[in-house]
Amino acid sequence: MALKGNLKDVGLNQLLNLIYLAHKTGALTIHRDAGSVAARLYFKEGKLIQTALDGQTARLTDIMVQVGKLTADQAKAIRARSKVDTDKELGLLMIQNNVLNQADIIQGVKNYLLESVYTLFTWHTGTFRFDPNVLPAEERITVAVSLDHLIIEGSRRVQEWEHLRDELPDLDVPLKFAERPDVNIRNINLSVEQWKVISFINSRNTIRQIASFLKMDEFQIRRIVYGLQTAGLVDVLPSTLTPGASGPVPLPPPAPPPVGRGVLLRVIDRLRKI
Amino acid sequence: MVVTGPFNSGKTAFIGSVSEIPVVRTERRVTDNTRAVKDQTTVAMDFGRITIDKDLSLYLFGTPGQKRFDFMWEILSEGMLGFVVLIDSARPETFREARRILDTFRTYSNTPFVIAANKQDDEDAWPPEDLRIALGLDQGMRVLPCIATRKESVKAILLELLYGILENVAEEQPVPARKR
């Protein structure tokens, strides 16, 4: 029986917690938006063993390049010597050619799996489906990664997301350059992403529109704008949202009704017979 | 006993499965966007009865599921023996609401309760144990499989709740073995 739902109802962290605590084996497929590319995570007995992003499982050589353990040229040379192109063969070629040892490969794959999942914590909408007992293709490498650390880091990222959302609740407002003569711009180093955002700042572009132009998700744009804001470089127009009224104060629990044991036993007896 | 849970979780069907009288329903046509889920919903309460003997009856009260009628919850919780939280196991979008209802009822009363993972005959239903983890419920909280349209399933839920209530009553005589 597949578990299905939406990430806005059951978050990724809750799903990982479920898979971890229930020691589940199977594949978790997440579609960020309807019809979009999917991320697929494979688990065995409650541990992450492989990921496939954009519908494809990366080859071992690609993984090692991505985590910085191989250069593109080294990866190309290894693949050229490969006959069957399985991860097992690619790994053996890396070891036999003294490019990497077994520990390097395992650590590299672990880092790749962790980073793949970390990016998914910024997905707050989308559909998911967990298919029990579905395992990855045999020719690709699997390394078991415990979910406890992943869940803790996921919680931290979710908290960061919530903090950013509190700081920047409204994305449908424009940015403007701050008028603060005390900020020494010469001493500030900006990242490429921050420069890209700055290049779109004017009174007509809202934060959401800038994110759309730059193909950034809400988490990315909020993080960049918040960084620029705290550095004193940009100002955001105040949000028109007002905090919601607090809920009713719960009443103290009343005393349980005085019901005798004999009455309860009569009810149980009758209920069994109906 | 009070039967509560989110909109369309099966409360009316649950009471109807065991009540010896036709359930007194207070259903009205749905006028908001929940109409896509069902046409009618409970607006005040459902009411069912099981006669135990000539001077004792068990009454089942179903709460309205939509949030705007939640002022009824506290009224219905006064003097209850215990409560059942019904959850539509195939609609994870209602899990958070189910948790909110459970937490609210626990502030009204410290009476025993059970959580019934309803619609287990639906192919999309989450198993009770997965539901318990997803809702963040303690191991000690009972989440039981349920199909509210089946009398035996409803009986099992009510009996489980009654055993829970019995455990809280001062010892007078031994508790009978649980029969399913």
Image: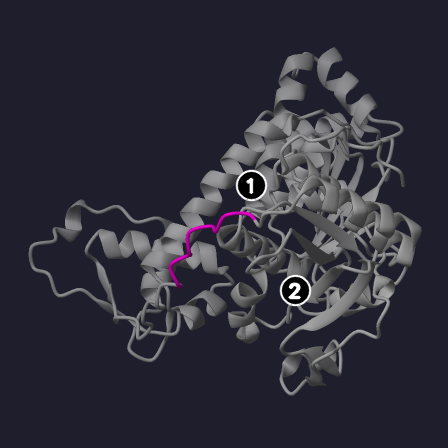
Q: Is residue A50 left or right of residue A82?
A: left
Q: Chain of mark 2?
A: B
User: Does the rendering let one see residue A127?
Assistant: no
Q: Position of residue A1 (x, y in %)?
A: 87, 48
Q: Is residue B115 above or below residue B177?
A: below
Disc 1 designates what residue? A118
Residue name at image x 35 percent, y 48 percent = A191
Residue name at image x 53 percent, y 39 percent = A154
Q: Quadrant of residue B47?
A: bottom right
Q: Amino acid at mark 1?
A: Tyr
Q: Chain of mark 1?
A: A
Q: Position of residue A52 (x, y in %)?
A: 73, 43
Number of numbered discs on residues: 2
Q: Which residues are magenta?
A: A248-256
Q: Is residue A247 left or right of residue B10?
A: left
The residue carrying pointer 2 sits among few (fewer than 14), some (14 to 19) or many (20 or more) residues within 10 Å by Cα, namely many
Q: Quadrant of residue B30?
A: bottom right
Q: Is residue A237 above or below residue A115?
A: below
The residue carrying pointer 1 sits among few (fewer than 14), some (14 to 19) or many (20 or more) residues within 10 Å by Cα, namely some
Magenta span includes A251: yes
Front residue of A269/A147: it is A269
Q: CA distance from mark 1 to mark 2?
A: 33 Å
Q: Amino acid at mark 2?
A: Pro
Residue B69: image tag: none
Label 1 element class: helix
Front residue of B8/A229: it is B8
SS assignment for the magenta stretch, majority: loop
Disc 2 designates what residue? B6
Label 2 element class: loop
Residue name at image x 69 percent, y 65 percent = B61
